[in-house]
Image (cartoon, coloured by chain):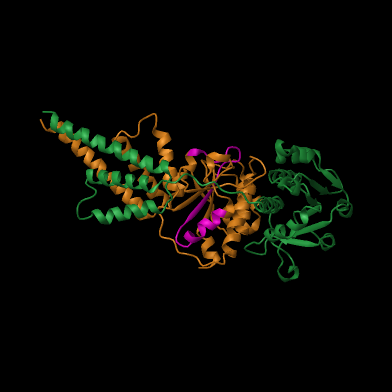
Chain colours: A green, B orange
Amino acid sequence: MGPETLLSHLAIVLVRPKIPENIGAAARIAWNMGINRLIVVRDNLPEREAMAKMATHKAAHLIDNLEIYPDLAEALANFSIVVGTTARRGRQRSVEKTPRELIDALLPSLAANQVAILFGPEDTGLTNDDLKYCQMSSAIPTADFSSLNLAQAVAIHCYEIYYGIVHAQKDMVVAPHLATSHELESMYAYLEESLYSIDFLNEVSHSYWMTNIRRFFSRMVLTSKDANIVRTVCKKLLLQQKNQKYKALGDP
Amino acid sequence: MGPETLLSHLAIVLVRPKIPENIGAAARIAWNMGINRLIVVRDNLPEREAMAKMATHKAAHLIDNLEIYPDLAEALANFSIVVGTTARRGRQRSVEKTPRELIDALLPSLAANQVAILFGPEDTGLTNDDLKYCQMSSAIPTADFSSLNLAQAVAIHCYEIYYGIVHAQKDMVVAPHLATSHELESMYAYLEESLYSIDFLNEVSHSYWMTNIRRFFSRMVLTSKDANIVRTVCKKLLLQQKNQKYKALGDP
């Protein structure tokens, strides 16, 4: 099953959000991370203009198709896995996962289930009554027992979900065409000649510097193109040195 | 070295942010993730009230201690590792890391170096001119070639950095003392002058080659010593060019 299908089994549920801009920002990040279902639990319709502005036109369809329920139970009726997000509160919430552990836990069930991720109001977070619908809870690790901005908490969860799903199916990375040993030696030969020509190298310092220079280039993985650039610079330098020498000798 | 110390070596740098609320939101998430240094590159002071509101009182000290510079080069002078965050743009930016790969790459160097993470303006992101200061770039994986809200991009990066530092189980290898942005820029200036002097660069090819050369050096992590070697070679070359020129002119 492809990532798109797995992502289509997820919904972001904002429970009693106060600020319409946060709904818009949640729509934008959800869409960016391949999640196209946004649900709001609220007594009344949030102001459309404020939502749409933060969503940007690219995520406008999430605002157009926004599902609004007055009641959380009703909103969750067709979901089989419900996750509550909370601020980390120490020992009371010992079962909580990090967002990364959450997606690892969800992955095996995602193909066959609809999953709702709940986020509470900006000021108070989810209540214990909201959390009773949840089989899992997730808290973002922070440096202190602090709480995040709602839109940022949604962002981090959506990001971890998307990353987890996409990277579960790893692609092969195509390596660039590396310089052959022959190309490297030719490059070093030109470098050596060039450094002699500008009196950077001399008989005494020669082997010390060439060893350092080789170490320097060995630390990166040079491509054929890289080696060729270095060689071209050296050729240009040597040619110019030669011309100047003739000029100095030849101009009487 | 403890997580707090490692986190104290990191700064979030907002380059020409337009919306003061985003500076506040960045302060809040940075503080939540244990990062207490926030730098803004901007011609004028952002409106304090708007920043403070989004920062909340807990992150107020980041707004109080906000460092503001009119110029990016000046802001970066004392950083030895500079990371640019970009929207994913496909193949051109093949060297970019995900935020998770970024913190893995940064961890070994964090104890001995100051690291700046740059975020561009809301509408356009970092320019190529901004990116030339960066040794690494980071892009948040998304479902489409889309761009995130600035505050959310900062949130995801701060989260990954905090998570990566706190969860690093492996022993850290101590990295050498890396070249500062100031040392690198001085090296590039000498390189540029040298390449002109041997006619490798000209007006037309100039920016193409300098971009390639910067990319080339960015792929390796240059130490202060490395930068100094390159600079010394260039000085030697320039001195010799000058002498030969005088010789050509002066020997009648």
**x 31%, y 47%: residue:** A188
Residue A119 in view: no
Residue A251 placement (x, y as % from top left): 13, 28
Residue A42 placement (x, y as % from top left): 84, 49
**x 56%, y 62%: residue:** B165
Residue A112 placement (x, y as % from top left): 81, 53
Residue B48 placement (x, y as % from top left): 60, 48
Quarter of the picture containing the C terminus of chain A is top left
Q: Is residue B108 rendered to the left or right of residue B139?
A: left
Q: Please determine whether, in this image, residue A214 is positioned above or below residue A224.
A: below
Q: Please determine whether, in this image, residue B56 is positioned above or below residue A90.
A: above
Whether residue B107 is in magenta: the answer is yes
Query: Which residues fall within the magenta stretch?
Result: B101-128
In-front residue for pair B159/A242: A242
Q: Quadrant of residue A186?
A: top left
In-front residue for pair A227/B84: A227
